[in-house]
Amino acid sequence: GVAVIFVLLGSNIGISLLKSFIPEKVRIPAYIIVIAAFVTIVDLVMQAYIQPLSESLGVFVPLIVVNCIILGRAEGFANRNTVGDSILDALGMGMGFTIAVTFIAFIREVLGSGTITLISMPFLPTGIIEVPGLHDAPAGIFVTSAGALLVMGFLKGFFNVKKQWALAIKKGWKMMIESIKNLPLFGGRKKQGEQA
């Protein structure tokens, strides 16, 4: 998450500053070069100071270069806005990405291993909480790459159903209010043949 925030900030600032110098024909390759520069910085810092994490991530950090979020924000926002607005956008998008990834990782860990991993504390020396009922029989598929896609699909379906339900309730309320307004008691329309 922190790496993505740094790359978003750096690329948005860089592209916002360079946008008037970049010809339209080479805009996307130029953005990729700017983004690649910041990803390389993140990769080198991780190799120098967080070696175990760098080794476990492997090729995934360089793949940030073509990450749709970063390229999309560079193309859709930083290119058309000021440096200040680009900084705010980068921070917001980076934090949103971090929250979403953390939420998905939490669900995957609970379902896939039946645990919740935290930092070690005096009352929790291992930093691991076992989830009753799931720890003894975890659904191992959720800790695989396919599990991430399953969780994202379930979440998308959940939010779609929630949205449709909210729209149906809103539509139902509108219909009910219209029906009440049409009652004669509330000055509604008179039926044909009725006297005024």
Image (spheres, rainbow, N blue to C red):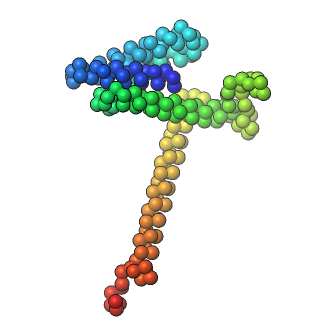
* Quadrant in which residue 182 is drawn: bottom left
Residue 171 visible in the current orientation: yes
Q: Reply above or below: 153 against 182.
A: above
Q: Residue at x 42, y 23 (%)?
A: 9
Relative to the observer, which residue lies in front, 31 or 21? 21
Q: Reply above or below: 154 against 76.
A: below
71 with respect to 136 (left or right): left
Relative to the observer, which residue lies in front, 164 or 96? 96
Q: Reply above or below: 40 against 74.
A: above
Furthest-top residue in view? 48
118 with respect to 77 (left or right): right
Q: Quadrant of the C terminus?
A: bottom left
86 with respect to 27 (left or right): right
Name the spot of residue 30 as percent of width and height, x first. Answer: 29, 18
Name the spot of residue 190 as percent of width and height, x first. Answer: 36, 84
The total number of labels drawn is 0
Q: Residue at x 38, y 16 (%)?
A: 36
Furthest-front residue in view? 84
Relative to the observer, which residue lies in front, 67 or 86? 86
Residue 68 visible in the current orientation: no
26 with respect to 130 (left or right): left
Q: Reply above or below: 161 against 135.
A: below
Q: Residue at x 35, y 17 (%)?
A: 34
Name the spot of residue 56 as percent of width and height, x first. Answer: 57, 16
